[in-house]
Amino acid sequence: MNCIQCQNPNPATVQFCQRCGARLNLTADEIRDTLIERESLARVDKTNQNAKQALFFGIVMFIASLTLYIAAGSPPRGAVHLPSAAESATYGEFQYRYEPEMSKARVPYEVNRKP
């Protein structure tokens, strides 16, 4: 008979495990309760492991986003920022340009006149 605690194979004539000393002569209810307890402990361990992985992932993402924010630097000159809706917000005048300014090209203009 295998021990429920340590899975050590024991002869059928002994009442206690030869390795860990656990009782081998168990009823079906005791075996069921032991298996349920073992599975609940395994579930708790898996949940703790998943929580640690999620925390680690969150920390890595925070550090990456902070690094990208710092690396981006200040916005370019002339960038338009949306005003805030806070009480202390100040609104500035913005010049919106939909098309960039283009200089006029100097092309000779010939008029075809009929003689």
Image: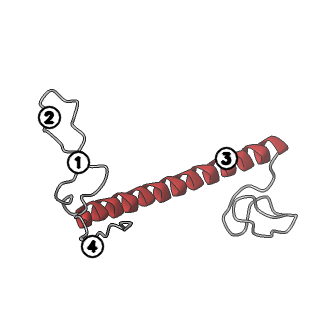
Query: In this rendering, would 90 be left or right of 63?
Result: left
* Colouring method of the image: secondary structure
Q: Amino acid at mark 1?
A: Val
What is the CA distance from the residue labelled 1 to the residue labelled 2?
12 Å
Circle number at residue 80: 1
Q: Amino acid at mark 3?
A: Glu
Residue at the spot 72% in from the left edge and 48% down from the top edge? 34
Residue 84, percent from left and from top: 21, 35
In this figure, which residue is indicated by the disc labeled 3?
37
Query: In this rendering, would 105 be left or right of 29?
Result: left
In this figure, which residue is indicated by the disc labeled 4?
108
Nearer-the-camera pick, 44 or 112: 112
Which numbered disc flags the more N-terminal residue, 2 or 4? 2
Residue furthest toward the front? 115
Residue 22, percent from left and from top: 69, 58
Residue at the spot 78% in from the left edge and 48% down from the top edge? 31
What is the CA distance from the residue labelled 3 to the residue labelled 1?
62 Å
In this figure, which residue is indicated by the disc labeled 2?
91
Nearer the viewer's eye, disc 3 or disc 4?
Answer: 4
Residue at the spot 80% in from the left edge and 41% down from the top edge? 29
Under circle 2, the secondary element is loop
What is the CA distance from the residue labelled 1 to the residue labelled 4?
39 Å
Residue furthest toward the top? 87
Are discs 1 and 2 less than 8 Å apart at CB? no
Nearer-the-camera pick, 61 or 38: 61
> How crowded is the residue under tag 3: few (<14 C-alpha within 10 Å), some, or many (20+)?
few
Q: Is residue 37 above or below residue 13?
A: above
Q: Amino acid at mark 4?
A: Pro
Under circle 1, the secondary element is loop
Q: Amino acid at mark 2?
A: Tyr
